[in-house]
Amino acid sequence: MNSTFDVLAAQLAEVGRHCYERGWALGTSGNFSAVVRKEPLTLAITTSGVDKGLLEANHIVAVDDHGRVVQGSGRPSAEATLHLAIVRSRGASAVLHTHSVWSTILSEATSGGSLTIEGYEMLKGLDGVGTHEHREVLPIVETILRGHPEAHGFLIRGHGLYTWGRDLADAKRQIEILEFLFEVMGRKRGMAWQQ
């Protein structure tokens, strides 16, 4: 597990710094994880309270399927149980959570409990989507995954985005696509609201 954990810790730190640089995880916001081992389930995850612009591999711990630290030092993210739930329910190997301005605004500016994105070319960047005619419905929930099995992520109202992937590269691509779409939609709605 050590070599796999070490590699994932370095990759998670790099993704975290990337999200910080893009303005999606400022200060200590956001948390990032990747599956080290499926049996028994072991997850590499960022520690709590670390500035994502300064994130290093030693800020990553490994937790077991109950969220208990089994490698590294520090306290795992307070949202480790949510990461574990997403890994279990989606079969994901990586989970990324950001607190961008656009995801936060859009999570509060929708009605009906979801944000619908459709008609944008960038939708093709999501896993398994081959056309801009796709309709992506992101539920805005506290924790509900079963009701939207086709969703590539979800928003927590007033809080931010969760997305996942088959591996860390896939999850990173998903977060880049969704954050781009949030900004487009937010700017477009801003123009419409001003009229």
Image (spheres, grey):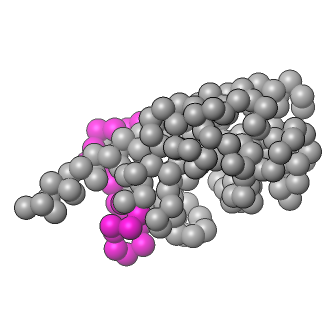
**Residue visible at 86% across and 24% down in the picture:** 3
Residue at the farthest left position: 195
> Vertically, is 56 above or below 139?
above
- In the rendered image, is residue 149 in sight? yes
Q: State the residue at coordinates (63%, 32%).
A: 54
Q: Residue furthest bottom?
A: 112
Q: Is residue 31 left or right of residue 156?
A: right
Q: Is 83 positioned to the left or the right of 68 in the image? A: left
Name the image quarter holding residue 32: top right
Q: Is residue 164 above or below residue 3?
A: below
Image side of residue 60 versus residue 143, left or right: right
| Residue 174 is inside the magenta segment | no
State which quadrant residue 125 falls in: top left
Q: Is residue 166 visible?
A: no
Residue at x-position 76% and y-position 38%:
60
Residue bounds of the magenta highlight: 106-126
Tell me if residue 123 is in the magenta stretch. yes
Query: Residue 64, position in %: x, y?
Result: 87, 50
Which residue is depicted at the point 81% across and 50% down?
75
Of residues 168 and 24, the one nearer the viewer is 24
Q: How many marks?
A: 0
- Residue 135 image position (x, y, % from top left): 35, 54
The x, y position of residue 50, in whole percent, is 68, 43
| Screen quadrant of the C terminus | bottom left
The quadrant of the rendering that contains the N terminus is top right
Left of 152 or right of it: where is 114?
Answer: left
When the figure is inspected, residue 64 is found, relative to residue 81, above or below; the finding is: above
